[in-house]
């Protein structure tokens, strides 16, 4: 088998919180993701999903263990890692005074795209994700779902190999989340590696090739939906999830 595009090994992150003391947000997890694969971190609120994705995106430094993207260590080679990834944060991160076109152009330029490629790709992305109608409206005037679409366009404008998506469909209505899900599946078809987080079992089932169930910073199980059903002896998705959390 080819070498993994994302490799996480015994990863740990401890936050020192004044009120709560030591918070073990990520407590020794390991996994690998290959090109052409959608890998879902599935866990309840506070499980450590966002923390893991922020470490992979070089925003947070791990307390222990290692994380690599395309062979580059997130601590030793953050610049190289950043070139390879598109990171969709869970919360906004958009400049409210700019328009979608300005934001996406800005990020494309930052990634070193040439003018023509950037312009063509922007048009094509805006059309396929459904941004064209409000491409020149200030972001502060957009709805939650519209902003989420812009955030996605910004994440992928430079056509990165590895997509790191923190709850990609949050805030989206059914038609919009369908568009985003289809987009994620298309990226997989192009051979990209996708690591996403969700707490929605159904979404993990629909999108993911493999699911990593995380709770209190630890791995509870990894596998396909069928494997998880077999492990737990349950059939209903909610029951599968709940019994894995209790395990
Ligand atoms: N900067 C921080 N300082 C202190 N504690 C933090 C910090 N960031 C996260 N945590 C804690 O780490 C734990 C994991 O948080 P994280 O955001 O990774 O969870 P999550 O799985 O993404 O949850 P959700 O589904 O609610 O988004 C939580 O207990 C959280 O309070
Ligand atoms: Mg989160």
Image: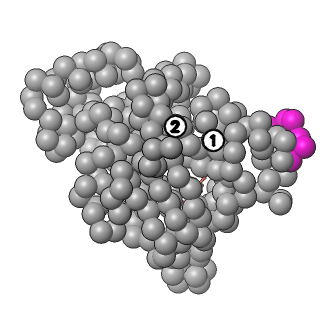
Residue 132 disc label:
none
Residue position marked by numbered label 2 in the rendering: 37
Query: Can the viewer see residue 138 in this picture?
Result: no
Tell me the quadrant of the picture where the C terminus can be found: bottom right
- Asked which quadrant contains residue 150, the reply is top left
**Residue shown at 61%/36% (left/top)?**
209
Of the two numbered discs 2 and 1 on the same chain, state the one appearing first in sequence: 2
Look at the picture and state if 57 lies above or below 13.
above
Tell me if I can see residue 47 in this picture: yes
In the rendered image, which residue does mark 1 sit on? Answer: 210
C-alpha span from label 2 to label 1: 8 Å
Q: What range of the chain is rendered magenta? A: 232-239
Q: Is residue 203 magenta?
A: no
Provide residue 152's location: percent of width, then percent of height: 38, 34
Q: Residue at x 64, y 50 (%)?
A: 212
Residue at 59%, 70% (x, y): give it: 28
């Amino acid at each position: 088998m080819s070498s993994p595009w994302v490799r996480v090994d015994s990863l740990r992150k401890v936050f020192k919180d004044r009120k709560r003391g030591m918070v073990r947000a990520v407590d020794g997890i390991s996994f690998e993701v290959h090109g052409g694969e959608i890998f879902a971190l599935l866990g309840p609120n506070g499980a450590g999903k966002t923390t893991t994705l922020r470490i992979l995106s070089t925003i947070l430094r791990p307390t222990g263990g290692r994380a690599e993207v395309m062979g580059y260590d997130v601590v030793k080679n953050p610049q190289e890692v950043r070139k390879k990834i598109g990171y969709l944060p869970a919360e906004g991160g958009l400049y409210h005074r700019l328009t979608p076109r300005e934001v996406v152009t800005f990020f494309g330029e930052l990634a070193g795209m040439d003018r023509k490629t950037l312009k063509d790709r922007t048009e094509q992305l805006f059309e396929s994700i459904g941004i064209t109608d409000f491409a020149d409206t200030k972001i502060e005037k957009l709805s939650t779902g519209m902003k989420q679409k812009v955030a996605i366009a910004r994440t992928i404008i430079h056509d990165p190999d590895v997509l790191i998506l923190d709850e990609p469909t949050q805030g989206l209505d059914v038609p919009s989340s369908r568009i985003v899900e289809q987009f994620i599946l298309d990226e997989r078809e192009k051979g990209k590696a996708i690591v996403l987080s969700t707490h929605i079992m159904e979404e993990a089932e629909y999108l993911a090739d493999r699911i990593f169930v995380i709770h209190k910073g630890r791995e509870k199980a990894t596998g396909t939906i069928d494997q998880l059903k077999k492990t737990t002896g349950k059939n209903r998705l909610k029951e599968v999830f709940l019994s894995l959390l209790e395990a």
